[in-house]
Image (cartoon, helix red, strand yellow):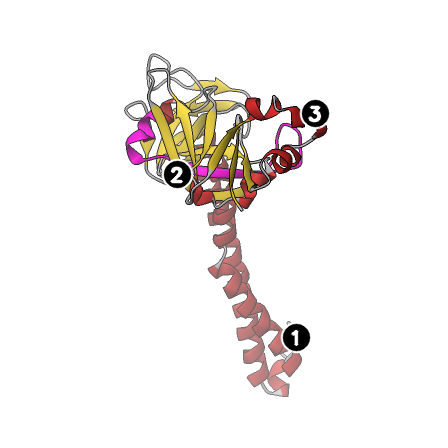
Amino acid sequence: MPVPGYVSNWLTESTWADQGAIIATVNEEDMALKRKELEINILKERINKQEELAKLEKQLEEIRFYQKLSTQERRWIDKKEQTDAKTIQSVEDKIRLARRELEIVEEKPRRDFAKEEETYTLKMPFQGKFQYHFSFPASQEQKIYLEANSPIATVCDDSAYYIAIPIANPDLIQLDPATLKAQVSLANGHLMTGTFSYKRVEKNTSSGGELLVYFFKLPEQLYEQAYNMLGSNCAAKLYFLPSEPVICLNKVELASHPESKWCTTWEQLLQRIHPEYELILDGESQLIVRKK
């Protein structure tokens, strides 16, 4: 809500709309009144500019008439006009300026009003779904009062859905993202699996700073299910799908090895126990290695 006021013209028959569709308006009656005032002010300004232009044109006409009179004829005219080239040029410039102002007399106020009207009109920024943050009244003709800064609706671009996973492990950054997949386990035992699409650095809203996030696109048949899960508390798992033969070593077994007491990192332990291997990925419960 840009200001305290009444919300109207919401949609009740659908939760999906095209880009640019109006899904609510704020203080519609006030904006209608402002629109009428705008037309009146434009009309007043147009009349003032037309009168100003008419006076200038008449002034120029009188100057040219006075210019054509003889010295003897000018003696009988009370109003003396300056007929030098500088004066004529000045009046002509004023006429050209007045005509230009008349041409654009309504352009700026209409543009300014359109910008103001946009802040009071909630439109879909893209094609997708939306959900209101208020309950519908009994009648569509009733209006809903909301305080300033109150949310009106949440919109969702449903052209694609992604599993977003922050990447903090430096080992993962070294891997080809195409070898990774993300999964979310559902209560019914099914899985939502996404394939890598793109990565982006985003602001870390909880602790500040920046965060590298990988986005894994879901198949289209899961879009509706993904939409219903928006805002839910779910956890995703990241899986590594190697493109070459690898070996998985159990971390618990490695930690139980006598050599572990001399090591402070998994790499050190790997060098002592399996010097023929090199570490590819330090996983949650396994070390993924390959032969050198």
Residue type at mark 1: give it.
Lys
As drawn, the label of residue 195 is 2
Q: In this view, does 282 lie to the left or right of 126?
A: right
Corner quadrant of residue 9: top left
Q: Which of marks 1 and 2 is nearer the N terminus?
A: 1
User: Cα distance, mark 3 to mark 1?
Assistant: 112 Å
Closer to us: 229 or 96: 229
Residue positioned 56% across, 85% down in the render: 68
Corner quadrant of residue 222: top left
Residue type at mark 3: give it.
Lys
Closer to us: 113 or 268: 268
Corner quadrant of residue 92: bottom right
User: Cα distance, mark 2 to mark 3?
Assistant: 39 Å
Q: Which residue in the structure is indicated by mark 3?
A: 261
The secondary structure type at the circle numbered 1 is loop
As drawn, the label of residue 99 is none
Q: Which of marks 3 and 1 is in front?
A: 3
Highlighted range, magenta = 202-225
